[in-house]
Image: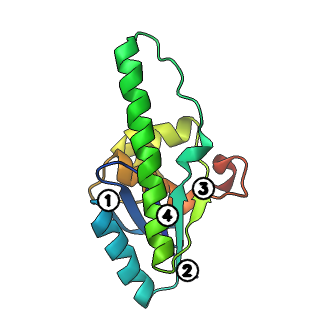
Amino acid sequence: MNYVVGIDPDASKPGFALTYGQKIIELRSMPQPELIEHIVSLAATHQLIVKIEDVEASKPTYARPGASRAEMLKIAQNVGQVKQAARDIVEQLKSKGITPVMVKPLRGKVKMQAKKNGAYFNKLTGWTGRSNTDSRDAALIALWGNPEVKSWQNSL
């Protein structure tokens, strides 16, 4: 059985999760250079599968009720920054000989609840440590992100 790394791309501190089987070993957010260094050091001692959320899979930025034009432009700008961060992470990992698996963003009520609610996430996964929305999303990607599965909830 391989260790699985899940990455939730972010412009400043991507979410990172390390799992083995259905158990979360490590969960945190860290700056991109530290993330790459950490994954490379793990790959030197462990058989790894690295999964990263494919933020390119979600193309449009939809209008949000109540959001002004300026707010929508800021959202679009943030999405662009996250997409670039994901591209950078993939390229840096590939340059180190690690080819990540691109995973479509997980969707649905269970995913949103687990990402936003730490207590629900802990109940779902058995994790008892600290977490934030990015690290929880990374764990969900590591545990259930699968480019072959149409609905991730079917794999729970």
On the image, numbered disc 1 is attached to which residue? 128
State which quarter of the image contains the N terminus.
bottom right
**Quadrant for the C terminus in the image:** bottom right
Residue occupying image coordinates x 39% and y 75%: 39
Label 2 and label 4: CA atoms lie apart by 20 Å
Q: Which mark is residue 61?
A: none
Mark 3 packing: few (<14 Cα in 10 Å), some, or many (20+)?
A: many
| Snapshot colouring | rainbow
* Tag 1: amino acid: Thr
Q: Which residue is mark 2?
A: 2
Taking the spot 42% from the left edge, 90% from the top edge, the residue there is 45
Q: Marks 2 and 3, Cα distance to the nearest angstrom?
A: 17 Å
Q: How many marks?
A: 4
Which of discs 1 and 4 lies nearer the camera? The answer is 4
- Residue at (60% x, 55% y) in the render: 103
Circle 3: residue type: Val
- Badge 1 density bin: few <14, some 14–19, many ≥20, Cα 10 Å: few
